[in-house]
Image: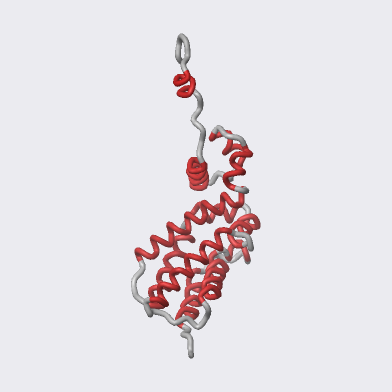
Amino acid sequence: MHSGPTTPLSRRLEAPTRATPRELFALAMDWWTKGERFDIGRMAQELGVSRATVFRWVGSRELLYGEVISKLFEDALATARREARGEGPALLTDITQRLLHHLVANEPLRRFVRQDAEYAMRVLMSKSSTVEQRCAASVRAALEEGVREGHIRPAMELDALAYVIIRMGESFLYRDAITGDPPDVESAITAIRILLTAEHRP
């Protein structure tokens, strides 16, 4: 604290710095990694802004989770693509297999599903889920690249194929929440390989 008279600059320097949406996202990522459930009120307090401000930034708690999990998916997909080998359907299958193994091994994601399976499925798989929409868009982009380079000739329209692949992966990845059985990556990959190798017949 300054002694003596204050100036406009000194008052600004002593005032708390206003947080930004980027800082909220960084906080959410930190809480996600530590297993802290998102609490908009606590987050707002930690950032020094109002709850209304945080809700204006994120829309809802579900959408904030969606942003964090979408980033997790993007990072895991990028890693899977770097590590994958092969070409054509074999390459896409290898990417998918590595992606699912990365997600199965992600403890914050598994913990999120264990804590409240019904809520987690709503965030991950509901009609309004930004996670599923973005995952499907990423898978479609990979399929489109495969078609453009002549490596695959899918028997299904790309939007439909991307959706089926995502749903197939989700069904086996989150089996513990859906049926009580453990995740089964190998069965998911077998089914996805069949979809990718089924070629369009003119």
Is 114 above or below relative to 144? above
Hey, which residue is sitting farthest bottom in the picture? 202
Residue 101 left/right relative to 130: left
Count the numbered circles shown.
0
Q: Identify the colour scheme used.
A: secondary structure
Looking at the image, which residue is at 44% across and 64% down?
99
Residue 117 left/right relative to 27: right
Looking at the picture, tell me which residue is in the foreground, 131 or 58.
58
For residue 147, which quarter of the picture?
Answer: bottom left
Is 76 above or below relative to 8? below
Looking at the image, which residue is at 51% across and 36% down?
19
- x%, y% of residue 155? 50, 83
Looking at the image, which residue is at 46% across and 16% down?
7
- x%, y% of residue 61? 61, 48
Is 119 above or below relative to 147? above
- x%, y% of residue 132? 56, 62
Hey, which residue is sitting farthest front in the picture? 8
- x%, y% of residue 69? 52, 54
Looking at the picture, tell me which residue is in the foreground, 84 or 112.
84
Looking at the picture, tell me which residue is in the foreground, 187 or 2.
2
